[in-house]
Image (cartoon, rainbow, N blue to C red):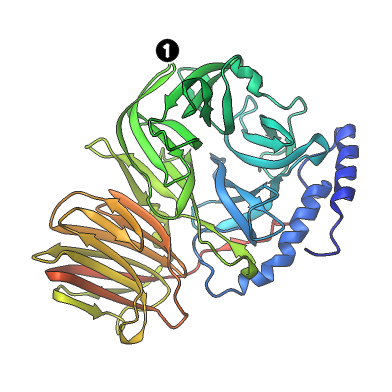
Protein backbone atom coordinates (compact mmCIF):
# COMPACT_ATOMS: atom_id res chain seq x y z
CA UNK A 1 0.00 0.00 0.00
CA UNK A 2 1.15 3.55 -0.70
CA UNK A 3 2.67 4.90 2.53
CA UNK A 4 1.41 8.41 1.68
CA UNK A 5 -2.15 7.26 2.27
CA UNK A 6 -4.00 8.32 5.39
CA UNK A 7 -3.88 5.75 8.18
CA UNK A 8 -7.06 3.78 8.81
CA UNK A 9 -7.25 5.32 12.29
CA UNK A 10 -7.02 8.84 10.81
CA UNK A 11 -9.67 7.99 8.23
CA UNK A 12 -12.05 6.55 10.85
CA UNK A 13 -11.59 9.60 13.06
CA UNK A 14 -12.24 12.04 10.20
CA UNK A 15 -15.25 10.03 9.01
CA UNK A 16 -16.73 10.01 12.50
CA UNK A 17 -16.44 13.80 12.74
CA UNK A 18 -18.00 14.30 9.30
CA UNK A 19 -20.79 11.83 10.04
CA UNK A 20 -21.61 13.68 13.24
CA UNK A 21 -21.80 16.89 11.23
CA UNK A 22 -24.04 15.24 8.62
CA UNK A 23 -21.59 15.92 5.78
CA UNK A 24 -20.20 12.44 5.03
CA UNK A 25 -20.91 11.33 1.48
CA UNK A 26 -19.04 9.98 -1.53
CA UNK A 27 -16.79 12.49 -3.24
CA UNK A 28 -13.42 14.17 -2.77
CA UNK A 29 -14.31 15.46 0.70
CA UNK A 30 -14.86 11.92 2.04
CA UNK A 31 -11.51 10.70 3.43
CA UNK A 32 -12.51 7.05 3.06
CA UNK A 33 -13.10 7.55 -0.68
CA UNK A 34 -9.97 9.68 -0.96
CA UNK A 35 -7.84 6.95 0.57
CA UNK A 36 -9.38 4.17 -1.53
CA UNK A 37 -9.07 5.96 -4.86
CA UNK A 38 -5.52 7.06 -4.21
CA UNK A 39 -4.64 3.42 -3.60
CA UNK A 40 -6.28 2.31 -6.86
CA UNK A 41 -4.60 5.05 -8.90
CA UNK A 42 -1.20 3.98 -7.59
CA UNK A 43 -1.83 0.42 -8.85
CA UNK A 44 -3.03 1.33 -12.37
CA UNK A 45 0.42 1.27 -14.07
CA UNK A 46 1.13 -2.28 -12.88
CA UNK A 47 -2.33 -3.54 -13.91
CA UNK A 48 -2.13 -1.92 -17.33
CA UNK A 49 1.35 -3.33 -17.98
CA UNK A 50 0.19 -6.96 -17.80
CA UNK A 51 -0.09 -8.29 -21.39
CA UNK A 52 -2.47 -11.06 -20.27
CA UNK A 53 -5.14 -8.66 -18.97
CA UNK A 54 -8.38 -8.71 -21.03
CA UNK A 55 -8.96 -5.57 -23.10
CA UNK A 56 -12.69 -5.58 -23.90
CA UNK A 57 -14.19 -7.34 -20.89
CA UNK A 58 -15.08 -4.81 -18.21
CA UNK A 59 -12.59 -4.48 -15.37
CA UNK A 60 -11.83 -1.87 -12.67
CA UNK A 61 -8.90 0.50 -13.13
CA UNK A 62 -6.86 -1.86 -10.94
CA UNK A 63 -7.04 -4.45 -8.17
CA UNK A 64 -9.89 -6.81 -7.30
CA UNK A 65 -13.51 -7.00 -8.39
CA UNK A 66 -16.24 -9.53 -7.80
CA UNK A 67 -20.07 -9.34 -7.92
CA UNK A 68 -21.89 -6.88 -10.21
CA UNK A 69 -24.15 -4.71 -8.04
CA UNK A 70 -26.96 -2.22 -8.60
CA UNK A 71 -26.93 -2.59 -12.38
CA UNK A 72 -29.35 -0.03 -13.79
CA UNK A 73 -30.17 2.06 -16.86
CA UNK A 74 -30.58 5.75 -16.04
CA UNK A 75 -30.84 8.78 -18.34
CA UNK A 76 -28.96 7.31 -21.28
CA UNK A 77 -26.34 5.41 -19.30
CA UNK A 78 -25.82 1.82 -18.25
CA UNK A 79 -24.54 2.02 -14.66
CA UNK A 80 -22.49 -0.83 -13.26
CA UNK A 81 -21.56 -0.95 -9.59
CA UNK A 82 -19.41 -3.82 -8.40
CA UNK A 83 -17.71 -5.36 -5.39
CA UNK A 84 -14.24 -3.86 -5.27
CA UNK A 85 -11.16 -4.08 -3.06
CA UNK A 86 -9.30 -0.81 -3.65
CA UNK A 87 -6.27 -1.96 -1.65
CA UNK A 88 -5.18 -5.25 -3.24
CA UNK A 89 -5.88 -7.75 -6.01
CA UNK A 90 -7.42 -10.17 -3.50
CA UNK A 91 -10.80 -10.24 -1.76
CA UNK A 92 -11.20 -7.82 1.15
CA UNK A 93 -12.23 -4.29 2.22
CA UNK A 94 -15.41 -4.46 0.14
CA UNK A 95 -16.43 -1.13 -1.45
CA UNK A 96 -18.70 -0.49 -4.43
CA UNK A 97 -16.80 0.53 -7.55
CA UNK A 98 -18.76 2.38 -10.22
CA UNK A 99 -18.64 2.85 -13.99
CA UNK A 100 -21.06 3.87 -16.73
CA UNK A 101 -21.41 3.23 -20.45
CA UNK A 102 -23.54 4.47 -23.33
CA UNK A 103 -23.11 1.27 -25.34
CA UNK A 104 -22.15 -1.60 -22.95
CA UNK A 105 -18.72 -1.75 -24.62
CA UNK A 106 -16.83 1.45 -23.78
CA UNK A 107 -16.76 2.54 -20.14
CA UNK A 108 -16.15 5.62 -18.06
CA UNK A 109 -14.73 4.83 -14.64
CA UNK A 110 -16.41 6.94 -11.97
CA UNK A 111 -15.41 7.61 -8.36
CA UNK A 112 -15.91 4.76 -5.91
CA UNK A 113 -19.56 5.01 -4.85
CA UNK A 114 -19.88 3.23 -1.49
CA UNK A 115 -17.41 2.69 1.31
CA UNK A 116 -17.48 0.90 4.69
CA UNK A 117 -18.66 3.31 7.40
CA UNK A 118 -16.11 2.17 9.97
CA UNK A 119 -17.26 4.77 12.47
CA UNK A 120 -20.58 2.87 12.55
CA UNK A 121 -19.01 -0.55 12.85
CA UNK A 122 -19.31 -1.37 9.14
CA UNK A 123 -16.42 -3.43 7.75
CA UNK A 124 -17.70 -4.34 4.28
CA UNK A 125 -20.27 -3.04 1.82
CA UNK A 126 -21.58 -6.34 0.46
CA UNK A 127 -23.69 -6.92 -2.66
CA UNK A 128 -27.09 -5.49 -3.48
CA UNK A 129 -29.35 -3.94 -6.08
CA UNK A 130 -30.88 -0.72 -7.35
CA UNK A 131 -34.37 0.56 -7.99
CA UNK A 132 -35.87 3.97 -8.73
CA UNK A 133 -36.69 5.82 -5.53
CA UNK A 134 -39.45 8.38 -4.94
CA UNK A 135 -37.20 11.08 -6.45
CA UNK A 136 -36.93 9.13 -9.73
CA UNK A 137 -33.23 8.43 -9.23
CA UNK A 138 -31.85 4.94 -8.59
CA UNK A 139 -31.46 4.09 -4.91
CA UNK A 140 -28.92 1.50 -3.81
CA UNK A 141 -29.71 -1.27 -1.32
CA UNK A 142 -26.93 -3.45 0.05
CA UNK A 143 -25.91 -5.74 2.89
CA UNK A 144 -23.86 -4.07 5.59
CA UNK A 145 -21.34 -6.37 7.26
CA UNK A 146 -19.56 -5.72 10.56
CA UNK A 147 -19.00 -7.11 14.05
CA UNK A 148 -22.75 -7.73 14.35
CA UNK A 149 -25.46 -9.63 12.45
CA UNK A 150 -25.88 -8.52 8.80
CA UNK A 151 -28.17 -5.58 8.05
CA UNK A 152 -29.71 -4.15 4.89
CA UNK A 153 -28.71 -0.52 4.27
CA UNK A 154 -29.77 2.18 1.82
CA UNK A 155 -27.68 4.75 -0.08
CA UNK A 156 -29.09 7.76 -1.93
CA UNK A 157 -27.67 9.69 -4.91
CA UNK A 158 -26.67 13.33 -4.49
CA UNK A 159 -26.88 14.22 -8.20
CA UNK A 160 -28.54 13.16 -11.45
CA UNK A 161 -25.28 11.70 -12.78
CA UNK A 162 -25.13 9.35 -9.78
CA UNK A 163 -21.57 10.38 -9.01
CA UNK A 164 -21.89 11.19 -5.30
CA UNK A 165 -23.77 9.11 -2.74
CA UNK A 166 -24.84 9.47 0.85
CA UNK A 167 -26.03 6.78 3.21
CA UNK A 168 -29.54 6.99 4.57
CA UNK A 169 -29.21 8.54 8.05
CA UNK A 170 -31.60 6.07 9.69
CA UNK A 171 -29.84 2.91 8.43
CA UNK A 172 -30.41 0.02 8.80
CA UNK A 173 -33.71 -0.25 6.97
CA UNK A 174 -34.00 -4.01 7.67
CA UNK A 175 -32.51 -6.14 10.43
CA UNK A 176 -32.92 -9.82 11.24
CA UNK A 177 -35.67 -8.85 13.66
CA UNK A 178 -38.00 -8.37 10.68
CA UNK A 179 -38.33 -12.19 10.54
CA UNK A 180 -39.89 -12.48 13.98
CA UNK A 181 -39.45 -16.01 15.26
CA UNK A 182 -38.10 -17.24 11.92
CA UNK A 183 -34.32 -17.74 12.00
CA UNK A 184 -32.45 -16.77 8.83
CA UNK A 185 -28.68 -17.19 8.62
CA UNK A 186 -26.23 -15.95 5.96
CA UNK A 187 -28.68 -13.16 5.13
CA UNK A 188 -27.54 -10.91 2.27
CA UNK A 189 -27.65 -9.53 -1.29
CA UNK A 190 -30.94 -7.59 -1.68
CA UNK A 191 -32.49 -7.42 -5.14
CA UNK A 192 -35.58 -5.29 -5.85
CA UNK A 193 -38.45 -5.37 -8.32
CA UNK A 194 -41.89 -3.86 -8.80
CA UNK A 195 -45.14 -5.63 -9.60
CA UNK A 196 -48.81 -4.61 -9.41
CA UNK A 197 -48.01 -1.23 -7.88
CA UNK A 198 -45.86 -2.58 -5.04
CA UNK A 199 -42.11 -2.77 -4.47
CA UNK A 200 -40.53 -6.04 -3.38
CA UNK A 201 -37.13 -7.19 -2.24
CA UNK A 202 -35.56 -10.64 -2.17
CA UNK A 203 -32.50 -11.68 -0.15
CA UNK A 204 -30.58 -14.90 0.07
CA UNK A 205 -30.16 -16.90 3.22
CA UNK A 206 -30.44 -20.14 5.10
CA UNK A 207 -33.85 -20.88 6.60
CA UNK A 208 -33.41 -22.69 9.90
CA UNK A 209 -37.01 -23.83 10.65
CA UNK A 210 -37.00 -26.07 7.59
CA UNK A 211 -33.88 -27.89 8.70
CA UNK A 212 -31.29 -25.47 7.39
CA UNK A 213 -32.52 -25.28 3.81
CA UNK A 214 -31.15 -22.62 1.47
CA UNK A 215 -33.94 -20.21 0.63
CA UNK A 216 -34.88 -16.89 -0.94
CA UNK A 217 -36.72 -14.49 1.39
CA UNK A 218 -39.37 -12.04 0.14
CA UNK A 219 -40.18 -8.60 1.57
CA UNK A 220 -42.70 -5.95 0.55
CA UNK A 221 -42.28 -2.20 1.00
CA UNK A 222 -44.76 -0.80 3.51
CA UNK A 223 -44.76 2.61 1.88
CA UNK A 224 -43.46 4.57 -1.12
CA UNK A 225 -40.41 5.85 0.79
CA UNK A 226 -38.86 2.32 0.61
CA UNK A 227 -37.56 2.57 4.18
CA UNK A 228 -40.24 0.45 5.88
CA UNK A 229 -40.68 -3.21 4.98
CA UNK A 230 -42.69 -6.27 5.95
CA UNK A 231 -41.59 -9.88 5.71
CA UNK A 232 -43.69 -12.04 3.36
CA UNK A 233 -41.85 -15.31 3.97
CA UNK A 234 -39.62 -17.68 1.97
CA UNK A 235 -40.63 -17.27 -1.67
CA UNK A 236 -38.44 -20.21 -2.73
CA UNK A 237 -36.69 -23.07 -0.91
CA UNK A 238 -33.90 -25.00 -2.58
CA UNK A 239 -34.24 -28.78 -2.60
CA UNK A 240 -30.54 -29.63 -2.71
CA UNK A 241 -29.60 -30.34 0.91
CA UNK A 242 -25.91 -30.03 0.00
CA UNK A 243 -26.40 -26.32 -0.72
CA UNK A 244 -26.24 -24.34 2.51
CA UNK A 245 -27.04 -20.89 1.21
CA UNK A 246 -28.33 -18.96 -1.80
CA UNK A 247 -26.37 -15.84 -2.75
CA UNK A 248 -27.30 -13.02 -5.13
CA UNK A 249 -30.91 -14.05 -5.87
CA UNK A 250 -32.55 -12.16 -8.75
CA UNK A 251 -36.33 -12.50 -9.21
CA UNK A 252 -37.87 -10.68 -12.17
CA UNK A 253 -40.54 -10.81 -14.86
CA UNK A 254 -39.37 -11.74 -18.35
CA UNK A 255 -42.19 -11.68 -20.88
CA UNK A 256 -45.10 -13.64 -19.46
CA UNK A 257 -42.93 -15.65 -17.06
CA UNK A 258 -40.85 -15.05 -13.96
CA UNK A 259 -37.19 -15.94 -13.66
CA UNK A 260 -35.20 -16.69 -10.53
CA UNK A 261 -31.40 -16.57 -10.79
CA UNK A 262 -29.26 -17.67 -7.88
CA UNK A 263 -25.66 -18.38 -6.91
CA UNK A 264 -25.53 -21.43 -4.60
CA UNK A 265 -21.73 -21.59 -4.03
CA UNK A 266 -21.45 -23.48 -7.30
CA UNK A 267 -22.28 -22.50 -10.89
CA UNK A 268 -25.24 -20.13 -11.11
CA UNK A 269 -28.62 -21.72 -11.67
CA UNK A 270 -31.94 -20.45 -12.97
CA UNK A 271 -35.59 -21.36 -12.69
CA UNK A 272 -38.40 -20.18 -14.99
CA UNK A 273 -41.97 -20.25 -13.73
CA UNK A 274 -44.75 -18.19 -12.15
CA UNK A 275 -44.88 -15.89 -9.15
CA UNK A 276 -47.92 -16.05 -6.86
CA UNK A 277 -47.63 -12.86 -4.83
CA UNK A 278 -50.83 -13.57 -2.89
CA UNK A 279 -49.18 -16.69 -1.47
CA UNK A 280 -45.66 -15.21 -1.70
CA UNK A 281 -44.43 -18.26 -3.64
CA UNK A 282 -42.35 -18.69 -6.77
CA UNK A 283 -43.51 -21.78 -8.69
CA UNK A 284 -40.73 -23.12 -10.95
CA UNK A 285 -41.44 -24.98 -14.17
CA UNK A 286 -38.02 -25.30 -15.82
CA UNK A 287 -34.55 -25.34 -14.32
CA UNK A 288 -31.06 -25.06 -15.73
CA UNK A 289 -27.47 -24.00 -15.17
CA UNK A 290 -26.87 -20.42 -16.17
CA UNK A 291 -23.17 -20.88 -16.89
CA UNK A 292 -21.14 -23.92 -15.78
CA UNK A 293 -17.82 -22.11 -16.13
CA UNK A 294 -15.97 -19.57 -14.03
CA UNK A 295 -18.77 -17.02 -13.67
CA UNK A 296 -20.82 -16.24 -10.56
CA UNK A 297 -23.03 -13.70 -8.75
CA UNK A 298 -25.60 -12.50 -11.28
CA UNK A 299 -27.43 -9.20 -11.52
CA UNK A 300 -29.83 -7.92 -14.18
CA UNK A 301 -31.00 -4.61 -15.60
CA UNK A 302 -33.57 -3.52 -18.18
CA UNK A 303 -32.60 -0.82 -20.69
CA UNK A 304 -34.59 1.68 -22.76
CA UNK A 305 -35.07 -0.95 -25.47
CA UNK A 306 -36.78 -3.27 -23.00
CA UNK A 307 -33.88 -5.71 -23.13
CA UNK A 308 -33.11 -7.82 -20.07
CA UNK A 309 -29.34 -7.61 -19.56
CA UNK A 310 -27.52 -10.23 -17.52
CA UNK A 311 -24.36 -9.25 -15.66
CA UNK A 312 -21.96 -11.84 -14.21
CA UNK A 313 -18.67 -11.83 -12.38
CA UNK A 314 -15.95 -13.46 -14.49
CA UNK A 315 -13.40 -15.15 -12.21
CA UNK A 316 -9.95 -15.11 -13.79
CA UNK A 317 -7.89 -16.37 -10.85
CA UNK A 318 -5.09 -13.94 -11.71
CA UNK A 319 -1.89 -13.81 -9.69
CA UNK A 320 -2.47 -10.83 -7.36
CA UNK A 321 1.07 -9.62 -8.02
CA UNK A 322 -0.11 -8.48 -11.45
CA UNK A 323 -2.17 -5.69 -9.91
CA UNK A 324 -5.58 -6.87 -11.10
CA UNK A 325 -7.89 -9.82 -10.60
CA UNK A 326 -11.17 -10.71 -12.36
CA UNK A 327 -13.47 -9.10 -14.92
CA UNK A 328 -17.15 -9.04 -15.77
CA UNK A 329 -18.43 -11.37 -18.45
CA UNK A 330 -19.78 -9.75 -21.58
CA UNK A 331 -23.24 -8.32 -20.87
CA UNK A 332 -25.73 -10.93 -22.12
CA UNK A 333 -29.26 -10.43 -23.42
CA UNK A 334 -31.70 -12.81 -21.74
CA UNK A 335 -34.81 -14.30 -23.32
CA UNK A 336 -36.93 -17.42 -22.88
CA UNK A 337 -37.01 -19.98 -25.67
CA UNK A 338 -40.13 -21.75 -26.91
CA UNK A 339 -39.06 -24.72 -24.79
CA UNK A 340 -39.31 -22.61 -21.62
CA UNK A 341 -35.55 -22.46 -20.97
CA UNK A 342 -33.35 -19.37 -20.89
CA UNK A 343 -31.36 -18.13 -23.85
CA UNK A 344 -28.25 -15.96 -23.44
CA UNK A 345 -26.64 -14.00 -26.27
CA UNK A 346 -23.81 -11.46 -26.08
CA UNK A 347 -24.87 -7.84 -26.44
CA UNK A 348 -24.75 -7.04 -30.18
CA UNK A 349 -22.94 -3.78 -29.43
CA UNK A 350 -19.69 -5.76 -29.27
CA UNK A 351 -19.84 -6.15 -33.04
CA UNK A 352 -18.53 -2.57 -33.14
CA UNK A 353 -15.10 -3.91 -32.11
CA UNK A 354 -14.81 -6.17 -35.17
CA UNK A 355 -12.16 -5.68 -37.83
CA UNK A 356 -10.34 -7.83 -40.41
CA UNK A 357 -12.98 -10.48 -41.10
CA UNK A 358 -11.67 -13.83 -42.33
CA UNK A 359 -13.82 -16.58 -43.90
CA UNK A 360 -12.72 -20.22 -44.01
CA UNK A 361 -14.52 -22.43 -46.56
CA UNK A 362 -16.20 -25.70 -45.65
CA UNK A 363 -13.91 -28.68 -45.18
CA UNK A 364 -13.97 -32.32 -44.20
CA UNK A 365 -12.32 -33.37 -40.94
CA UNK A 366 -11.37 -37.00 -40.52
CA UNK A 367 -10.14 -37.66 -37.00
CA UNK A 368 -7.72 -34.76 -37.30
CA UNK A 369 -6.88 -31.25 -36.15
CA UNK A 370 -6.23 -28.59 -38.79
CA UNK A 371 -4.46 -25.34 -38.00
CA UNK A 372 -6.04 -22.14 -39.27
CA UNK A 373 -3.13 -20.04 -38.04
CA UNK A 374 -2.05 -19.08 -41.55
CA UNK A 375 -5.30 -17.11 -41.79
CA UNK A 376 -6.61 -16.70 -38.22
CA UNK A 377 -4.42 -15.92 -35.24
CA UNK A 378 -4.45 -13.58 -32.27
CA UNK A 379 -5.35 -13.30 -28.63
CA UNK A 380 -8.38 -11.00 -29.11
CA UNK A 381 -10.80 -12.69 -31.49
CA UNK A 382 -14.47 -13.34 -32.15
CA UNK A 383 -15.42 -16.38 -34.19
CA UNK A 384 -18.52 -18.14 -35.50
CA UNK A 385 -18.51 -21.71 -36.71
CA UNK A 386 -20.84 -24.58 -37.50
CA UNK A 387 -19.97 -28.27 -37.48
CA UNK A 388 -21.89 -31.41 -38.34
CA UNK A 389 -20.86 -34.92 -37.36
CA UNK A 390 -20.76 -38.06 -39.40
CA UNK A 391 -19.03 -40.58 -37.14
CA UNK A 392 -17.03 -38.16 -34.98
CA UNK A 393 -17.50 -38.36 -31.23
CA UNK A 394 -16.14 -34.85 -30.71
CA UNK A 395 -15.64 -31.76 -32.88
CA UNK A 396 -14.89 -28.09 -32.40
CA UNK A 397 -12.06 -25.59 -32.09
CA UNK A 398 -8.91 -24.91 -30.11
CA UNK A 399 -7.91 -21.34 -29.28
CA UNK A 400 -4.51 -20.04 -28.12
CA UNK A 401 -2.83 -23.09 -29.66
CA UNK A 402 0.88 -22.98 -30.30
CA UNK A 403 3.41 -24.24 -32.82
CA UNK A 404 3.81 -27.93 -33.53
CA UNK A 405 0.41 -28.79 -32.11
CA UNK A 406 0.90 -27.25 -28.67
CA UNK A 407 -2.51 -27.63 -27.06
CA UNK A 408 -4.73 -24.61 -26.55
CA UNK A 409 -8.12 -24.36 -24.88
CA UNK A 410 -10.42 -26.95 -26.44
CA UNK A 411 -14.04 -26.04 -27.21
CA UNK A 412 -15.73 -29.32 -28.10
CA UNK A 413 -19.18 -30.74 -28.79
CA UNK A 414 -20.04 -34.40 -28.28
CA UNK A 415 -22.98 -35.26 -30.58
CA UNK A 416 -23.57 -38.54 -28.78
CA UNK A 417 -24.57 -36.97 -25.45
CA UNK A 418 -25.19 -33.31 -26.35
CA UNK A 419 -22.40 -31.98 -24.11
CA UNK A 420 -20.54 -28.79 -24.96
CA UNK A 421 -17.23 -28.33 -23.15
CA UNK A 422 -14.81 -25.43 -22.85
CA UNK A 423 -11.81 -26.56 -20.86
CA UNK A 424 -13.22 -28.31 -17.78
CA UNK A 425 -16.68 -26.67 -17.97
CA UNK A 426 -19.58 -28.74 -19.31
CA UNK A 427 -22.98 -27.58 -20.61
CA UNK A 428 -25.87 -29.54 -22.10
CA UNK A 429 -27.31 -28.58 -25.47
CA UNK A 430 -29.86 -30.21 -27.74
CA UNK A 431 -28.95 -33.62 -29.05
CA UNK A 432 -28.17 -33.65 -32.73
CA UNK A 433 -25.42 -33.98 -35.29
CA UNK A 434 -24.82 -30.23 -35.71
CA UNK A 435 -23.58 -27.44 -33.45
CA UNK A 436 -23.35 -23.68 -34.00
CA UNK A 437 -20.69 -21.92 -31.95
CA UNK A 438 -19.89 -18.29 -31.28
CA UNK A 439 -16.84 -17.46 -29.21
CA UNK A 440 -14.90 -14.54 -27.79
CA UNK A 441 -11.20 -14.69 -26.92
CA UNK A 442 -9.87 -11.82 -24.82
CA UNK A 443 -6.31 -12.62 -23.74
CA UNK A 444 -6.96 -15.05 -20.81
CA UNK A 445 -10.77 -14.80 -20.92
CA UNK A 446 -12.88 -17.02 -23.16
CA UNK A 447 -16.65 -17.00 -23.69
CA UNK A 448 -18.54 -19.55 -25.75
CA UNK A 449 -22.19 -19.51 -26.86
CA UNK A 450 -23.90 -22.45 -28.55
CA UNK A 451 -26.99 -22.67 -30.76
CA UNK A 452 -28.06 -19.02 -30.51
CA UNK A 453 -27.69 -18.87 -26.75
CA UNK A 454 -28.89 -22.32 -25.71
CA UNK A 455 -25.72 -22.59 -23.62
CA UNK A 456 -23.09 -20.11 -22.48
CA UNK A 457 -19.71 -20.66 -20.80
CA UNK A 458 -17.16 -18.21 -19.41
CA UNK A 459 -13.75 -19.68 -18.70
CA UNK A 460 -10.06 -18.85 -18.84
CA UNK A 461 -6.96 -20.16 -20.52
CA UNK A 462 -3.29 -19.79 -19.70
CA UNK A 463 -1.01 -19.67 -22.71
CA UNK A 464 2.36 -18.08 -23.44
CA UNK A 465 2.19 -14.89 -25.52
CA UNK A 466 3.35 -16.68 -28.66
CA UNK A 467 0.41 -19.10 -28.57
CA UNK A 468 -2.11 -17.27 -30.76
CA UNK A 469 -3.23 -19.99 -33.14
CA UNK A 470 -6.69 -21.41 -33.87
CA UNK A 471 -7.45 -24.98 -34.93
CA UNK A 472 -10.53 -26.93 -35.97
CA UNK A 473 -10.75 -30.63 -35.17
CA UNK A 474 -12.76 -33.82 -35.14
CA UNK A 475 -11.94 -36.92 -33.09
CA UNK A 476 -13.31 -40.45 -33.10
CA UNK A 477 -14.39 -40.26 -36.73
CA UNK A 478 -15.43 -37.87 -39.47
CA UNK A 479 -17.13 -34.47 -39.27
CA UNK A 480 -17.52 -31.44 -41.46
CA UNK A 481 -16.81 -27.80 -40.81
CA UNK A 482 -19.68 -26.02 -42.57
CA UNK A 483 -18.25 -22.52 -42.11
CA UNK A 484 -15.85 -20.52 -39.97
CA UNK A 485 -15.68 -16.76 -39.77
CA UNK A 486 -13.38 -14.79 -37.51
CA UNK A 487 -12.70 -11.17 -36.61
CA UNK A 488 -9.91 -9.48 -34.73
CA UNK A 489 -11.42 -7.41 -31.91
CA UNK A 490 -9.95 -4.05 -30.98
CA UNK A 491 -9.81 -2.99 -27.31
CA UNK A 492 -12.78 -1.31 -25.70
CA UNK A 493 -12.41 2.18 -24.29
CA UNK A 494 -11.94 2.64 -20.52
CA UNK A 495 -11.83 6.31 -19.60
CA UNK A 496 -10.23 7.45 -16.35
CA UNK A 497 -11.07 11.15 -16.79
CA UNK A 498 -13.75 11.06 -14.07
CA UNK A 499 -11.82 8.75 -11.76
CA UNK A 500 -10.67 11.56 -9.51
How packed mark 1 is, by other alpha carbons closer than 10 Å (few <14, some 14-19, many 20 or more), is: few
Residue 6 visible within the image: yes
Residue 215 vs residue 480, the one in the foreground: 215
Instruction: Give how far across and how far down residue 423 sits, in percent.
Output: 35, 63
Q: Position of residue 9 (x, y in %)?
A: 88, 48
In this orientation, does residue 225 appear? no
User: Helix, strand, or loop for circle 1?
Assistant: loop
Q: Front-most of 235 and 441?
A: 235
Total labels drawn = 1
The quadrant in which residue 467 appears is bottom left
Quadrant (top left/top right/bottom left/bottom right) for the N terminus: bottom right
Kindly identify the residue that appears in the image at 46 percent across and 54 percent down: 329
Residue at image point 58% right, 67% down: 319
**Nearer to me, 360 or 270:** 270
Residue 113 falls left or right of residue 423:
right
- Residue furthest to the bottom in view is 404
Measured along the vertical axis of the image, is residue 487 above or below residue 496? Answer: below
Residue 145 lies, in percent from the top left, at 69, 37
Tell me what residue is drawn at x 44 percent, y 46 percent. Answer: 266
Quadrant for the C terminus in the image? bottom right
Q: In the rendered view, does 94 fall on the left or right side of 270? A: right
Q: Residue at x 43, y 65 (%)?
A: 353
The percent coordinates of residue 97 (x first, y second) are 65, 50
Report which residue position mark 1 lands on. 278
Point out the residue furthest to the left here.
Answer: 390
Vertical relation: 342 (above or below) 203: below
Residue 487 figure quarter: bottom left
Amino acid sequence: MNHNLLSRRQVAKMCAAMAAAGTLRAGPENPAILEAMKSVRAAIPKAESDPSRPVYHFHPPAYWNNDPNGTVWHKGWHHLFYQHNPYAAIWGHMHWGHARSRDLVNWEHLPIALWPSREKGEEHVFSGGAIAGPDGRPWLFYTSIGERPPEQWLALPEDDELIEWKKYPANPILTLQIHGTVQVNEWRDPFLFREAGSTYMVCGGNLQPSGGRAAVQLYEAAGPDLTRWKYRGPVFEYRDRDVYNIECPNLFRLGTKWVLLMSPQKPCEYFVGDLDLARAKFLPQTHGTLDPGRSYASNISFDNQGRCILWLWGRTGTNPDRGWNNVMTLPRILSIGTDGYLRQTPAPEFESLRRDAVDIPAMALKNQSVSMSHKISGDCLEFEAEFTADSATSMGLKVRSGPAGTAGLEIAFNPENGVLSAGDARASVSLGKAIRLRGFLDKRAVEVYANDGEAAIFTTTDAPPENTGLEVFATGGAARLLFLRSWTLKPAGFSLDRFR
